[in-house]
Amino acid sequence: MVNIPSSIDDPIPPAEVEDVELYHSHSWWTTYVFSQDAKVIAIQYSMTAMSIGVVALVLSWLMRIQLGFPGALPFIDAERYYQFITMHGMIMVIYLLTALFLGGFGNYLIPLMLGARDMVFPYANMLSYWLYLLAVLVLVASFFAPGGPTGAGWTLYPPQAVLSGTPGGQDWGIILMLVSLILFIIGFTMGGLNYVVTVLQGRARGMTLMRMPLTIWGIFTATVMALLAFPALFVASVMMLFDRLLGTSFFMPAIVEMGEQLKHNGGSPILFQHLFWFFGHPEVYIVALPAFGIVSDLISTHARKNIFGYRMMVWAIVIIGALSFVVWAHHMYVSGMNPKFGFFFATTTLIIAVPTALKVYNWILTLWRGDIHLTLPMLFALAFIVTFLNGGLTGLFLGNVVVDVPLSDTLFVVAHFHMVMGVAPIMVVFGAIYHWYPKITGRMLDETMGRIHFWVTFLGAYLIFFPMHYLGLLGMPRRYYEMGETAFVPPSAHTLNEFITIMALIVGAAQMLFLFNLFWSYRRGKDAGGNPWRATTLEWQTPTTPPPHGNWGKDLPIVYRWAYDYSVPGAAEDFIPQNQPNPDRISREHMS
Amino acid sequence: MAVVLILVLVAVASVVFHLLSPWWWTPIASNWHYIDNTIIITFWITGFVFVAVVLFVAYCVFRFRHKPGNRAHYEPESRKLEFWLATLTAIGVAAMLAPGLFVWNQFVTVPSDATEVEVVGQQWLWSYRLPGADGRLGTSETRDVTSDNPLGLNKNDPAGLDDVIIQGGELHLPVNKSVKMLLRSIDVLHDFYVPEFRAKMDMVPGMVTYFWFTPTRTGTFEVLCAELCGVGHPQMRGTVIVDTEEDYQTWLQQQQTFTQMMASGETKTVN
């Protein structure tokens, strides 16, 4: 057995730079609105993301009602249906999950967990949020633009995305969508560079890379990936904007649209798909890796046990991040690209399963011989393991090229990606909010509301997406406004669709309870104290809670140990904070 | 305890649902039963892992849930255990990948005796083209599409003049004869999808894609579009009828060739 904590005795390096003076706000506006404090920016990011997330939730209700009870809401015609699915997907993936994990949790946790006073570039950090808000507003504006938002599906595949057979294709919808994405990426880049530089340069003395909590490893790796992946989406968006507005033909071959020859010629629709998925697959892990990191810390803290195989966990995150750049075309097995690519991409895709499986093993081995407190964060972490496992395993169907052929473009795919990058990361988001809300507000979230929220969300989401796989196996295609009469679809499949819709309405309603809890507990929640979970990481060791601007009062913390000293044999408490010196060490330093 | 019971229930109910589900794949009508077999292998391996992990988690929660005075075991890592877990996982993954790649090799290798059949997609209609007596399809170009030449055939290519054209109608195929489906679109992406054949492929404007299969039983099958192609996407349906050789020949004689179609088009304009 390798004893990682032996590195406790590593010398603490001297401070390389003087403690920097922060920008001090002078007014309410610069404190709460145009704030340069990463914690305020984190709250702004999170609240904006959750607000637009509510829009996505309502859209999912509407589309489910159409699928379960076709025609029940007469205003949902085919055009609106496609606009709803497109906006739902885009909002959830980009404007909610990416923004919440990196802009929200990243901003809040990176400086606090690493013992920094703030991000290294606070001003750019502030701009990052305002560009994100602008991107969201442009997106929302498309709902009110002539023709409405784009209905091209969240993948925005040309040529249909810019043609008149698709809602918003020849109106404002697709233009505003692309402009919004471009703004989002510019804003993200400002934030992302900040996160990377802060992790590399802003850590407290003694916080070596291999002492960082896995939360930071997850967010850090995801940010590096995002900085490499988003440019592909950026150029694809610009090129498509040119095709739509300037008449270029990057993605447009010769086309006869409704009997009329268009002026485009020579472009390649598949080129867009390569660019999109070169971004799009890493994007899955940009959402998943922060979730992996956070859930590791939730499990460790609430099972009172060090995360099992920390170094393996770090390397698994890094390896998954790297491999995720060479698997993108597994989204394109039936796209018409040269089918020989299938051999390569199926192999790389299934190789990723190995480090991913190791992470699952290490989570459950952390539970083994732990002291498991079934708190809300732990419950959500358990739900994450179940749903992520389920979604990850169905990925082995879709990644295995030949198995993907009958299943691609069916509800099996919809069920798979919702389970693995919808439900599972959102379980972590909830677990993380129940975990860190006490630090952010000084109060605990209400336990009863939390438990109702947990059980309805976990079991409801599972009941939505688990049976859906079987509709896909049956052959029901995705993105169908209505199934109509189809010979191979039995009436029982429609009954199942009704059931799924009812579950979706219930699970959605439970989220309203969660949002209510956020507001209710802010004033009336139980007083939390500084470290209610008795956790080791630095954010719980701040002199005051909630931490003020600058986080640490007069002196920055010094880190003496890794983040997982739970239940150390011989220690008085079942946790030792990272900034607590080793008693031996103090005496030895004293002697020398 | 409720947590333990529900975790066990999730694992057990998922398996029971799988075994009893009335929603299962359509009866296969092509040679791709290998694909179905690979799915079955994958179901067994992944199902085993799912149940094992969820039950293990349930056991951990049952056995190691907090009781006053409990203290967790301290063990940062175990290289040996992690090595064995990695090795076993790699073997399981290889057991799924190997048959998958083996079958994929068959999927991308078109038999030399396969008959070519062209499918043309447009919003929101399927058309088909069969080689005429010469056994060859003539060349085509999206630029050549006009109202009297809806598939854009090259009028100067003699190989195309005898091609059989079926616009918006039913496609017939002879049973037990391999076909290479050549897929073409003149506007946006489409995807020729017949669930019973298992195979599908996108149709991309500007290029010709393909897949091959052998129909193995006669019958009538519904064609769906599997790639979002605009608001009419769910209505883009068609029919494939797999015939005995005799019935197929009878049907084939009734279809019009490109030359006949142009002639009838001209007659119409004259009238």
Image (cartoon, coloured by chain):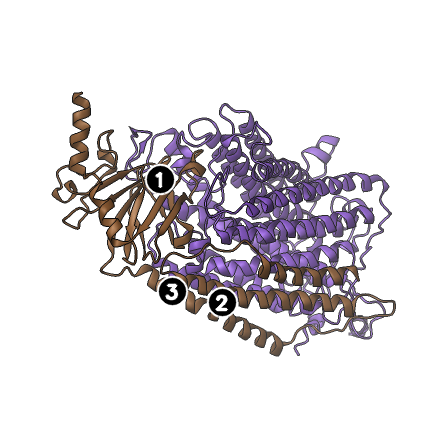
Q: Can residue A266 be seen in this view?
A: yes
Please, which chain is the residue tagged with disc 1 on? A
Q: Mark 2 points at which residue?
A: B41
Q: Mark 3 points at which residue?
A: B103
Within 10 angstroms of label 1, few (less than 14), some, or many (20 or more) residues?
Answer: many
Please, which chain is the residue tagged with disc 3 on? B
Q: Left or right of B144: which side holds A390? A: right
Residue A251 is tagged as: 1
Residue A466 is tagged as: none
Give the secondary structure at mark 3: helix
- Residue A176 position in % (x across, y down): 49, 31
The residue located at (17%, 32%) in the rendering is B262
Give the secondary structure at mark 2: helix
- Residue A373 position in % (x across, y down): 79, 61
Q: Chain A is drawn in which colour?
A: purple
Within 10 angstroms of label 2, few (less than 14), some, or many (20 or more) residues?
Answer: some
Which quadrant of the structure image shows residue A43? top right
Give the residue type at disc 2: Ile
**Relative vertical location of residue B165 with respect to residue A300 in this rendering, above or below:** above
Marks 3 and 2, how far apart at CA: 13 Å
Indicate which label's residue lies in the foreground, 3 or 1.
Answer: 3
The residue located at (72%, 35%) in the rendering is A32
Q: In which quarter of the image is the N terminus of chain B?
A: bottom right
Give the residue type at disc 3: Val
The answer to which of A133 and B116 lies nearer the viewer is B116
Q: Left or right of B43: which side holds A104? A: right
Chain drawn brown in the picture: B
